[in-house]
Image (cartoon, rainbow, N blue to C red):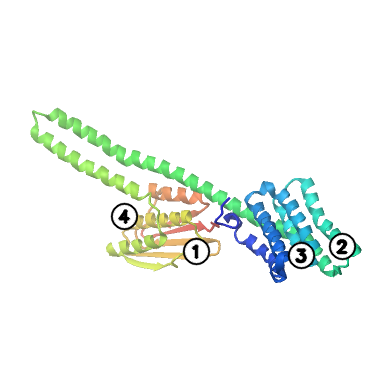
Amino acid sequence: MNVMRLFPEKYGRAPLFWLIYMLVPLIALIATGGWEGGFGLLLLLVFFLMFRDMYWHPSRAFLDALGMTALLAVLLFFFHETFIYLSIYTTYSLYFIHKRWKIIVVYMLAPLLFFELYMLTLYSSRVIDFSTIVAAMILVAAIPVGIRNEVKSWNMKEQLSKANRRIEELVKQQERERIGRDLHDTVGQTLSMITLKSDIARRSLPDKIEQAEREIKEIHTISRTVLNQIREIVSDLKQLSFREELIHAEKLLREMEMEAVVDAPVPVHGLNPLYENILAYSLRESITNVIRHSFASRCTIRVEDLPEEVRMTISDDGIGFKGEPGNGLLGMEERLHMISGRMNIESAKQRGTVLVVHVPKVQK
């Protein structure tokens, strides 16, 4: 059990809301004073601990409900009948209980307390306001409806959380596959060239010193290229911030003497770190393509923060392109597909290119 938290984090603030119903009994017991008030406060504390225990140990919820009912019976015997409202907490245990016979027993606990109060009117001098009791019974009967709505909400959050974790795992797997392709296509090919060059240099010694020196110099140059390629691949693994990537993209375009038009709300809302990372990667890859291939004089970046998605449009006035997209765009499309996103490209020769990226908003 986490002693630093009242309730498990996954339930949010809902359990704290239910504690409101303990305020009136708490104030009444404090006002009572003396040993009777102290005894009542002790019972109320144990009652609260049982309610809390249901959240940390759901398998004990039925026993907690029975225990709370026993404590409530004692409180009703010694104190005011309005304490019947605390039976709300015993009914709330239905959220954690799934066996049918246990559910039936819990439903019968509140009527048993009602019967206790009725017996007190018959065999004691206490005068009990039964209109208050009836109102409490109606409230207790309505609790399962609220519980059902809370269950739906919590289940939905749990499903979204599991889906996000699954997506993150799949994206990581996709990243590993992409890194493998990058290493094979770039570093692997370059290392093969180093092997070939070193073999030529070895055969050139000692008869062709000049050729051997030339080959060794090329090996040195190629090895530096390999190092840079590895650095590029590793840097691509870092967590990307969309805000930082947007600033970097605008700076790159201006360094290339392109007119950069940026219309983007920062920060964008409703994206978890994974989705923001993919949006930032898409921006980086798109701007890289504009700089390398478009020969454009103007590039526009527009980001729309819509209720259901973030839509990013990148357009240029360059030469356009025909044919199949390259590995960069394919990698972008693969990432977007993993989070149920998509991209559209429109391009015509000498009429520029428009790329639209759709990243859905999913609850964290």
Circle 4 is placed at which residue position?
292
Mark 4 or 3: the one toward you: 3
- C-alpha span from label 4 to label 1: 31 Å
Q: CA distance from mark 2 to mark 4?
A: 88 Å
Is 191 situated left or right of 333 in this image? left
Q: CA distance from mark 3 to mark 2?
A: 14 Å
Q: Is residue 130 left or right of residue 103?
A: right
Q: Residue at x 78, y 65 (%)?
A: 79
**Marks 3 and 1: which is nearer the front?**
3
User: Disc 2 marks which residue?
Assistant: 120
Count up the numbered dots. 4
Camera-nearest residue between 190 and 356: 190
Kindly report the distance in space between the C-alpha atoms of the residues bearing marks 4 and 3. 75 Å
Q: Earlier in the sequence, mark 4 or mark 3?
A: 3
**Mark 3 or mark 2: whose residue is earlier in sequence:** 3
Q: Is residue 176 left or right of residue 27?
A: left
Residues at marks 3 and 1, CA–CA distance in whole angstroms: 45 Å
Lower position in the chain sequence, tag 2 or tag 1: 2
User: Tags 2 and 4 in contact by the CB under 8 Å rule?
Assistant: no
Amino acid type for the residue under numbered disc 1:
His
Identify the residue shown where x is 36% and y is 59%.
350
Evaluate whether residue 218 shows in this view: yes
Task: Count residues near mark 4 (Cα–Cα under 10 Å), then give few for <14, some for 14-19, many for 20+.
Answer: few
Q: Secondary structure at mark 2?
A: helix
Residue 353 placement (x, y as % from top left): 40, 59
- Dot 4 lies on which element? helix
Mark 1 or mark 3, which is nearer the start of the sequence? Answer: 3
Asked which secondary structure carries label 3, the reply is: helix
* Disc number placed over residue 83 in the picture, else none: 3
Q: Are marks 3 and 1 in contact (CB under 8 Å)?
A: no
Q: Which mark is residue 269?
A: 1
Label 3 crowding class (10 Å Cα cut-off): few <14, some 14-19, many 20+? Answer: many
